[in-house]
């Protein structure tokens, strides 16, 4: 059982692509080997900045010979059919066999595929993998036509067993597979030749290359935390950065450096963002949480113990942070003076050419936040003030430099401007929630502005008819709608969407209205969009699709809090034995009734009278329905869905008994009509709770 | 290793002699205002077509919006790029590049040199490529790009392009914190000159002109003129009626594209181009660059059969 070693050695592979590339290599090669009839014991793939490697253990030495028989057309069939059959089987017509069959003589093709040695298959599969590799972006180089992520320099392709290692003969666009590679770019000179995976990994290590990304990441983290700990400090965890840095080095050397005192007053988020985004430094904090040092990871060891490297990095950081400090101080000056220039300059920023500038938008959000304030329990003036400055930081120098700090800087600057805590918080929180798991704001002012922001966006884009289609959602409207849903639900707000959309639409005003829509957002369509988002959101929480549909079909469905309360109560009811069976009873009643209505051309809607009841079960059902109606009506009015649905589920027994004992379509027409009218009472009573016709099963 | 350069010009000279020794034609700067060394026809146009090419040159570059009146330690509206272009890109281009760092005194055994993903795209040139920014001890010292497309044409063969930001690189090598303090010639010279002696005043003058004085109506008119002239040049029949020769005027047309591009940058610095207009202007310059590229590939230098 030979083992296979593959290495594809290239110029530097972008860090973010390495992990996926290693697993793609593994999948492409192992799938190809299996498809060609080989089996293997295990496989593992690796990536460094300059190489992808794959180790496959316990490969079969050759594929099995395969014999396949195919039955073809009858003897005497048209020549074309016979030729086509032979061609499909890949053999000559003369090689077809004629065999007796029940219905006469038939052509058979016997296809013999001899077993093939592993090397032949490996060569074929690897060449295919290299040529069709799914890089996110690939390129050509020199005069060649091969595409790879960056120029590909050499290939190791080695099959090894007890007898030794053998290079798999293979050539891709002039690159011949061999058994040699290179070590670290600067710490090792010359080539290394290898005999198998263990030898490869060991020799790479001697040549200053750690093959495994997780090993490099662990070393970096271990060394960084140790060095920080020795100084009584702590490295700020950042897994994304750790993975990226591990993809930038073959031989990680961790260096701990100081941040000049000049910059320690900057907000920690600014320090961290600047260091991470520009320099790929980890932040190191002291016991009080202040960021005071940084960790940089070099790719090399030097005679001076990294002193030159660290000094250089410190110098670059100094320049970077000087910029950040310059922005921060300029911004603070504007903030302390009340932020007016920023608010003014928002008029120069186009939000959307049909929806005006950011300033227009802010004015709309102010109006809407003021309207929404009572609903969320916020002070109207405070909500309006929070909305007024919510986007001010978009004009700040810091956010221009680091867009990811929007909102957070707004909060710092609002504090500097002397805003109330609630107003300052809203500058940061009104963007939330940004997804299904992001934290939802609960502070009333933040909620008012967050809702106003999202409702204005949604209504605006609906008014100009720029809705998401398929996978295209350039204005992130699905996320905005989910934001509205989560803000309403998690704060238990009673905010009928129809009213909210109408208000937003009114504020939007005639000047923003497109000709196609005559200026109005289609509120029903927009509500439907929210219902669709709600279904996805609730499904993830285990609420059934059909249950939501049954509740959406009820009046008042634009009150999401109510809608979800109803859906959850219904789902709970359906999970009980009575509830589940009630649905069957309801459906049976509904079916019989619908058929009769269709046949007779009349609607059986009222007039059921117990005096025409012939059977005890029939009379019992009358009583049960009276009792249910007595409970359900006030419970529904009180939005006590649990009680209403429990009362509805109580009907299960009487309905089952009724169908057991009574034939609805009786010969006596009066009795029949009375029974149909009784069924209609079941329908009416149940449909008052939820549209059970939409429940599946 | 050669002696470590002691001045800005020392670094330029070291790069010139290094790339000359590696077989590049050492060209002179293009005599027009450009935003980057890539605009030099020795790169933009020569990256097109099948003919082999190797050139290196310094290119003064202008970015009006980056002007800071000479006060910022490393931002300038006029600065120098060093540009190397080799077609087809040789297999040892990374090693050649590292050799050039050594030539200017960056010892790889003491420094941390890294190739960090950075894809290059020039919307105005209709060009893109893949490569890296090269980091030395955390500082970006060069751009390294394999051109894939220029002027809307696929590059076959592919050119390898190296761009060094000379001031920043030199400040690092010479350990200077403010660009204006950097020695321009050898500090031991009879008349030692700093970068500031040469450029401080002009940075002020141009910053004032770029930001506040340049007449926008004139600039707009010049933009339109350049655009029209470019189209007019390319609309001429290939055969020159006077000489009877086939002369496609790709370079004169491209000069107009360069002009339009720089005029756009000036208008941008004057703050008269809105966000939405911006894309439209960039599109107009790109259309010119593409038309010039289309013309160039029909010429002998562009690889067309003579």
Image (cartoon, coloured by chain):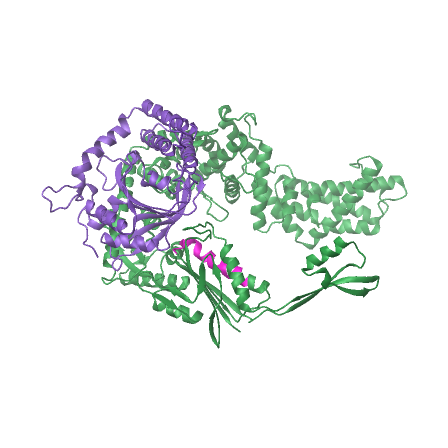
Chain colours: A green, B purple
Q: Which residues are magenta?
A: A11-30
What residue do we see at 47% from left, 59% from top?
A22
Position in image of residue A180 (x %, y %): 40, 66
Q: Is residue B87 visible?
A: yes
Lateral position of residue B65 relative to residue A14, left or right: left
Magenta highlight on residue A536: no
User: Which residue is outermost to the left?
Assistant: B190
Classify residue A535 as left or right of residue A392. Answer: right
Up-down: is A384 above or below A678?
Answer: above
Pick out the residue farthest to the bottom.
A162
Q: Quadrant of residue A295?
A: bottom left
Q: Is residue B272 above or below residue B155?
A: above
Give the x, y percent position of residue A82: 75, 56
Between B48 and A339, which is closer to the camera in this rendering? B48
Q: How many marks?
A: 0
Q: Position of residue B142 (x, y in %)?
A: 31, 48
Q: Main secondary structure of the magenta part?
A: helix
The residue lying toward the viewer, choosing from A550 and A299, is: A299
Q: Horizontal and vertical percent for residue B94? A: 34, 54
């Amino acid at each position: 059982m030979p083992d296979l070693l593959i290495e594809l050695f290239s110029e530097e592979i972008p860090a973010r692509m390495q992990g996926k590339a290693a697993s793609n290599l593994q999948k492409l090669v192992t799938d190809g080997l299996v498809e060609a009839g080989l089996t293997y014991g295990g496989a593992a793939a690796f990536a460094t900045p300059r190489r992808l490697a794959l180790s496959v253990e316990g490969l079969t030495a050759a594929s099995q010979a395969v014999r396949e028989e195919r039955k073809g057309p009858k003897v005497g069939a048209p020549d074309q059919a016979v030729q086509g059959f032979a061609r499909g089987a890949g053999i000559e017509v003369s090689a077809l066999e004629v065999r007796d069959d029940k219905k006469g003589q038939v052509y058979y093709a016997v296809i013999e595929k001899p077993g093939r040695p592993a090397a032949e298959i490996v060569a074929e599969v690897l060449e295919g993998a290299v040529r069709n590799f799914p890089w996110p972006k690939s390129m050509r180089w020199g005069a060649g036509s091969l595409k790879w992520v960056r120029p590909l320099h050499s290939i190791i392709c080695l099959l090894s067993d007890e007898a030794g290692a053998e290079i798999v003969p293979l050539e891709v666009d002039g690159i011949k597979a061999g058994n040699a590679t290179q070590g670290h770019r600067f710490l090792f000179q010359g080539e290394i030749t290898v005999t198998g995976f263990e030898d490869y990994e060991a020799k790479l290590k001697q040549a200053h290359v750690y093959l495994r990304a997780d090993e490099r990441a662990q070393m970096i983290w271990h060394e960084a935390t140790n060095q920080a700990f020795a100084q009584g400090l702590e490295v700020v965890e950042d897994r994304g950065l750790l993975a990226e840095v591990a993809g930038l080095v073959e031989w990680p050397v961790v260096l701990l450096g100081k941040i000049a005192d000049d910059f320690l007053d900057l907000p920690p988020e600014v320090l961290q963002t600047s260091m991470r985004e520009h320099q790929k430094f980890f932040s190191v904090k002291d016991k009080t949480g202040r960021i005071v040092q940084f960790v940089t990871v070099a790719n090399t060891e030097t005679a001076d113990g990294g002193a030159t490297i660290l000094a250089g990095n410190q110098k670059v950081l100094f320049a970077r942070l000087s910029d950040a400090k310059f922005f921060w101080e300029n911004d603070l000056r504007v903030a302390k003076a009340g932020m007016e220039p920023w608010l003014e300059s928002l008029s120069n920023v186009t939000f959307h050419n049909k929806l005006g500038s950011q300033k227009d938008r802010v004015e709309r959000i102010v109006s809407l936040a003021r309207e929404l304030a009572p609903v969320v329990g916020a002070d109207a003036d405070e909500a309006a003030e929070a909305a007024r400055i919510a986007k001010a930081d978009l004009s700040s120098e810091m956010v221009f430099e680091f867009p990811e700090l929007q909102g957070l800087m707004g909060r710092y600057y609002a504090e500097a401007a002397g805003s109330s805590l609630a107003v300052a918080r809203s500058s940061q929180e009104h963007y939330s929630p940004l997804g299904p798991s992001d934290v939802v704001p609960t502070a009333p002012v933040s909620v008012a502005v967050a809702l106003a922001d999202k409702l204005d966006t949604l209504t605006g884009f609906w008014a100009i008819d720029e809705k998401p289609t398929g996978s295209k959602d350039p204005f992130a409207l699905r996320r905005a709608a989910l934001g509205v849903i989560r803000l309403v639900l998690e704060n238990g707000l009673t905010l009928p969407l129809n009213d909210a959309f109408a208000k937003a639409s009114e504020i939007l005003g005639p000047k923003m209205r497109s000709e196609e829509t005559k200026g109005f957002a289609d509120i029903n369509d927009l509500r439907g969009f929210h219902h669709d988002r709600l279904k996805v959101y609730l499904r993830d929480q285990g609420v059934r699709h059909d249950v939501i549909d049954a509740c959406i079909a009820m009046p008042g469905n634009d009150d999401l809090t109510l809608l979800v309360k109803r859906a959850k109560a219904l789902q709970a009811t359906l999970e009980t034995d009575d509830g589940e069976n009630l649905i069957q009873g309801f459906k049976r009643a509904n079916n019989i009734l619908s058929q009769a209505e269709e046949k007779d051309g009349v609607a059986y809607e009222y007039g059921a009278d117990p005096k025409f009841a012939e059977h005890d079960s029939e009379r019992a059902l009358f009583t049960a329905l009276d009792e249910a109606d007595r409970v359900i009506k006030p419970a529904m009015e009180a939005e006590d869905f649990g009680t209403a649905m429990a009362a509805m589920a109580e009907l299960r027994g009487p309905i089952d008994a009724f169908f057991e004992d009574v034939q609805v379509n009786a010969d006596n027409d009066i009795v029949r009509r009375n029974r149909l009218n009784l069924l209609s009472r079941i329908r009416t009573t149940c449909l008052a709770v939820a549209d059970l016709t939409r429940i599946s099963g | 290793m050669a002696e470590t350069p002691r001045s800005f010009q020392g670094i330029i000279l070291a790069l010139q002699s290094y790339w000359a020794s590696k077989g590049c034609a050492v060209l002179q700067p293009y005599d027009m205002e450009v935003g980057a060394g890539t605009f030099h026809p020795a790169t933009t146009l020569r990256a097109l077509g099948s003919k082999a090419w190797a050139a290196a040159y310094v290119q003064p570059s202008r970015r009006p919006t980056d002007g800071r009146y000479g006060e910022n330690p490393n931002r300038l509206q006029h600065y120098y790029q060093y540009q190397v272009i080799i077609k087809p890109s040789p297999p040892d281009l990374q090693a050649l590049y590292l050799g050039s760092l050594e030539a200017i005194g960056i010892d790889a055994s003491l420094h941390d040199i890294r190739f960090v993903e950075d894809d290059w795209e020039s919307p105005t040139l209709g060009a893109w490529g893949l490569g890296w920014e090269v980091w030395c001890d955390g500082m970006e010292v060069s751009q390294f790009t394999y051109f894939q497309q220029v002027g809307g044409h696929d590059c076959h063969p592919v050119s390898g392009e190296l761009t060094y930001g000379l001031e920043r690189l030199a400040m690092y090598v010479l350990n200077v914190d403010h660009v204006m303090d950097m020695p321009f010639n050898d500090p031991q010279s009879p008349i030692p000159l700093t970068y500031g002696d040469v450029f401080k005043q002009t940075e002020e003058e141009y910053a004032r002109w770029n930001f506040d004085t340049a007449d926008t109506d004139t600039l707009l008119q010049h933009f339109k003129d350049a655009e029209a002239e470019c189209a007019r040049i390319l609309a001429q029949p290939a055969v020159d009626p006077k000489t009877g020769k086939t002369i496609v005027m790709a370079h004169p047309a491209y000069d107009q594209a360069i002009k339009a591009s720089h005029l756009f940058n000036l208008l941008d610095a004057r703050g008269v181009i809105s966000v939405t207009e911006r894309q439209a202007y960039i599109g107009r310059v790109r259309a010119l660059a593409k038309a010039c590229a289309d013309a160039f590939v029909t010429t002998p230098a562009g690889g067309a059969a003579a």
